Image (tube, helix red, strand yellow):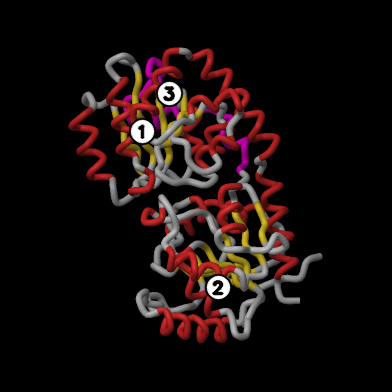
Amino acid sequence: MAKALRILHIFPSFELGGSQRRMVTYLNETKAPHTHLIHALDGCYDAADLTEHFTKANLPEGMIEKGDTVAAVRACRRLLAKVKPDLLVTYNWGSIEWVLANRWPKRAPMIHIQDGFAEDEQISEKPNRQRLRRVAYRACDRVIVPSRQLEAIARESWRIKSDKLVYVPNGIDTAKFEGEADKALLARHKLNSDHHLIGTVARLNPEKNIGRLIEAFSAIENKHPSARLVIVGDGVGMSALKMLAERICQPERVIFMGAMDTPQQIVPAFDMFALSSDTEQMPISVLEAMAAAKPVASTDVGDIKQMITPENGPFVQGREAAELATSLDTLLSDPALGKSIGTANQKKVRDQFGLQTMVDTYDQLFAANGKK
């Protein structure tokens, strides 16, 4: 049996995002005996509602102030001495001070997990951050990435050696998305079997660029009177996106459902899944749509073309609303094609992106890198 470890996870935020959803899924499924302490630097623990299998780290919130890196690193180092974890796991750029704090000398073995970049690094890395990542991440025992694109960046930009760099694709419980949608939920939003649903599931943050999707839908909605755009998610952009939909789309054709803890209640009702992001790596929402046997219309970002089947490839193009509109139009015009692509997507996600494979891999990585 694996040794029970005290693992301290440092998240910039424990909001309902991709890395947080992956972690709560892991916590709900793992049988490993570890104690998981989670600390959210911004004090947001929204994702905690999805699991009971963790302990909120007893660390002061707001102590680590951005802007004074030296002071922040010193504060993190004091907190590490207090907690004494058997393994430190950090996430994304927002936890960089903790990575730097665990050096000279190390207080605990360390894994860094990088899921992508924020809005201000969509085009390229900021040079100062690139340099700091090289210094910080190369000191980690392992650097984990969920996409081949990030794997290349870690190897070439941050110069992580191959024996420390680990590609671990996201995995999901595919069976959850193979059932039927919640008919009562659909009815509350005035949706029925006569409608053809273009759906997306995303935080309504700038990098998701849901405005691009609304613009694409407005270009094809007159041609497809039965089409509805269903947006599942919440975030800072909600008000502005509602105003945009009211201005350029027909009334009641764009439905905002808000955040949902259980997207399997709605995704099976979609005729297709749409993604309009400026930046992604390996979005869990796309895997969930594939598990529900849906075709995907998307901007060409991250690993999406590698995730989907070749048949779906022509509908992952560019980064313009017009290109996305063409994909939506074609799939709405040929339902048989969409179903064929969806069936192939479902088979691929079952074969390659199952939940248990991901859970087993993280179990092995935590056990192998924790304090002996």
Q: Quadrant of residue 165?
A: bottom right
Q: CA distance from mark 2 to mark 1?
A: 36 Å
Q: Which residue appears farthest toward the right when viewing the image? A: 1
Examine the rendered structure and indicate whether residue 90 appears above or below residue 279: below
Mark closer to the chain start, 2 or 3: 2
For badge 1, the amino acid type reads Glu
Mark closer to the chain start, 2 or 1: 2
Confirm whether residue 96 shows in the render: yes
Q: Which residue is mark 1?
A: 320
Q: Which residue is mark 2?
A: 135
Which range is magenta?
Answer: 172-196
Asked whether, in this view, residue 283 is left or right of residue 34, the answer is left
For badge 3, the amino acid type reads Ser
For badge 2, the amino acid type reads Val
Mark closer to the chain start, 1 or 3: 1
SS under mark 1: loop
Q: Quadrant of residue 307?
A: top right
Examine the rendered structure and indicate whether residue 106 appears above or below residue 228: below
